[in-house]
Image (spheres, rainbow, N blue to C red):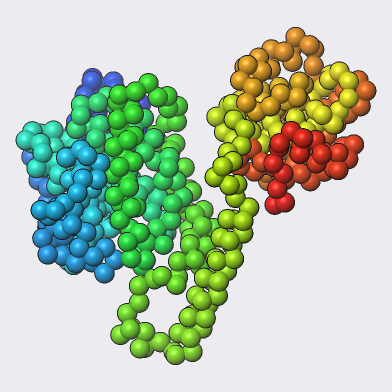
């Protein structure tokens, strides 16, 4: 079947297929994802293959010029001459891979060029940098022009979807997020990877970029470099993992991108204001512009920024004060893969176990939504602790706890609660019940809110078991 026939069979909106639909079509047709994207463009625009490729080449022409300027003479008020630094005679390797090093260097050079002659934006100018860096390096390192065209098609298809998804400020849908996703797909296409590997690579690349704000680096010198350059490095890691390891991935790429777009909106509302508050003192200023601003406004701004630095100093000193010494930095080992998702609720259950007396016959587990969703990994830990008092490092009990509960006829009740961070474990036993009501915290720690028979007894148990309780 042809690409268009496969799309029709699945009722895909041909001409506007999602990345996931392009991947599905590639799997069924036996073509690469880039070939599917090029074919879709040919079939739905009326242009020949050569014309489609010429349009893509034209789209990159200005940005490639900007990248070239960044390597030769450009200077950025935010990034200095980093493009020249990474491509000149005294350049240093970033990743140790010539191709990847070129992509990173040209990506940063493109941003320098952006501050010289501007860039044609995709989702924004941030993701145009890694797209440009990748294409410039690819043209130098690969002679197969058809392969390069298919790879460009993958970049632009992915970037085009992010362009629509980016509706407010946020690097997760621009420089680092879109950049990581598109270049991860490009690495796979260029290496001849399978459609399934491309899907996995994009999902893996997107994961660490979710909700990352761009506001701190928009006016703060230097920070943009690790956003856009980091996107490329994340993409390389993701593509290599997808193509050369057995690492699993179960999230469809379209679901991942849709989630990223929604997290993008939430980040703009909740995360960006915090970053603005803390980064404002370090924003780049132009005295010529400030000359037009009311002097009192400028004075208020300086006062606010000075107060923020004092506030941050107090906060970081408190963190340092409460930090463990380097001679005893870690908590007890946690099986199950997460100190927060497994370790903290397990420790809560362990306290509840030692508050109870006699033979355990029921365990009631109340978890807030995030922990409830992760019950496949935390319930085994909770049960081994609630039934036998096992610690978080007991890998044998973790593996056997569900079977042990069934064998002993122990009643287990799991309930989702709405209150954030809550983990409440009740152990019903023959000679006395025990209950620990706590809030989940990282590092296997918890905030003890209530306990039965008493909070005081629960605190004593926690201290004896080396379970870390915190105040908030």
Percent of width and height locating residue 288: 30, 85
Of residues 132 and 91, the one drawn nearer to the viewer in this rendering:
91
Of residues 423 and 396, the one drawn nearer to the viewer in this rendering:
396
Task: Using the rendered image of the protein, determine whether residue 259 is visible from the camera's viewpoint.
Answer: yes
Task: Using the rendered image of the protein, determine whether residue 12 is visible from the camera's viewpoint.
Answer: no
388 sits left or right of 2 in the view: right
Q: Which residue lies furthest to the front in this view?
A: 327
Up/down of 92 relative to 350, above or below: below
Percent of width and height locating residue 46: 15, 40
Q: State the image quarter where residue 103 is shown.
A: top left
Q: State the image quarter where residue 421 is shown.
A: top right
Task: Give the residue drawn at x 19%, y 67%.
Answer: 75
Up/down of 294 relative to 139, above or below: below
Of residues 51 and 405, the one drawn nearer to the viewer in this rendering:
405
Q: Residue furthest bottom?
A: 295
Task: Give the residue drawn at x 35%, y 77%.
Answer: 285
Of residues 433 and 199, the one drawn nearer to the viewer in this rendering:
433
Label count reads 0
Q: Residue furthest top?
A: 407
Q: In which quarter of the image is the N terminus?
A: top left
Task: Give the residue drawn at x 30%, y 42%.
Answer: 233
Percent of width and height locating residue 249: 42, 27
Task: Give the residue drawn at x 51%, y 76%.
Answer: 306
Percent of width and height locating residue 422: 71, 42
Q: State the image quarter where residue 101 is shown.
A: top left
148 sits left or right of 394 in the view: left
């Amino acid at each position: 079947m042809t690409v268009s026939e496969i799309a029709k069979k699945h009722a895909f909106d041909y001409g506007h297929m999602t990345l996931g639909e392009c991947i599905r079509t590639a799997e069924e047709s036996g073509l690469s994802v880039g070939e599917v994207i090029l074919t879709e463009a040919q079939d739905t625009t009326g242009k020949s293959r050569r014309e489609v490729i010429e349009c893509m080449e034209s789209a990159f022409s200005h940005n490639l010029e900007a990248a070239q300027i960044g390597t030769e003479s450009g200077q950025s008020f935010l990034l200095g001459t980093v493009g020249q630094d990474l491509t000149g005679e005294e350049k240093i390797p970033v990743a140790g891979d010539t191709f990847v090093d070129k992509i990173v260097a040209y990506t940063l050079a493109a941003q320098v060029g952006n501050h010289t002659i501007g860039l044609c934006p995709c989702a924004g100018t941030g993701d145009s940098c890694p797209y440009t860096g990748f294409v410039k390096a690819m043209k130098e390192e690969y002679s197969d022009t058809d392969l390069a065209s298919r790879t460009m098609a993958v970049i632009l298809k992915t970037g085009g979807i992010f362009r629509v998804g980016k509706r407010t400020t946020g690097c997760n849908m621009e420089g680092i997020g879109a950049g990581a996703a598109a270049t991860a797909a490009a690495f796979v296409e260029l290496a001849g990877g399978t459609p399934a590997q491309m899907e996995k690579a994009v999902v893996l690349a997107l994961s660490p970029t979710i909700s990352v704000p761009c506001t701190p680096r928009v006016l703060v010198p230097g920070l943009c470099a690790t956003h856009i350059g980091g996107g490329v490095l994340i993409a390389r890691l993701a593509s290599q993992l997808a193509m050369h390891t057995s690492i699993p991935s179960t999230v469809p790429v379209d679901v991942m991108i849709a989630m990223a777009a929604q997290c993008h909106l939430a980040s703009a509302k909740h995360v960006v204001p915090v970053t603005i508050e803390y980064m404002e003192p370090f924003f780049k200023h132009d005295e010529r512009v400030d000359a037009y601003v009311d002097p009192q406004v400028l004075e208020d701004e300086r006062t606010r920024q000075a107060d923020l630095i004092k506030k941050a100093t107090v906060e970081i000193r408190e963190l340092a004060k409460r930090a463990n010494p380097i001679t005893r930095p870690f908590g007890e080992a946690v099986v199950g893969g997460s100190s927060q998702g497994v370790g903290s609720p397990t420790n809560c259950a362990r306290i509840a176990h030692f508050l109870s007396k006699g033979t355990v016959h029921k365990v009631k587990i109340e978890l807030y939504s995030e922990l409830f969703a992760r019950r496949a990994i935390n319930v085994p830990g909770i049960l081994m602790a609630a039934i036998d008092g096992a610690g978080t490092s007991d890998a044998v009990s973790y593996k056997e706890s569900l079977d042990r509960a069934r064998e002993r006829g122990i009643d287990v009740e799991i309930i989702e609660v709405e209150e954030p961070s809550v983990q409440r474990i009740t152990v019903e036993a023959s000679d006395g019940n025990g209950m620990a009501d706590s809030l989940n915290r990282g590092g296997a720690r918890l905030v003890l809110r209530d306990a039965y028979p008493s909070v005081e007894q629960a605190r004593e148990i926690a201290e004896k078991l080396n379970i870390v309780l915190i105040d908030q």
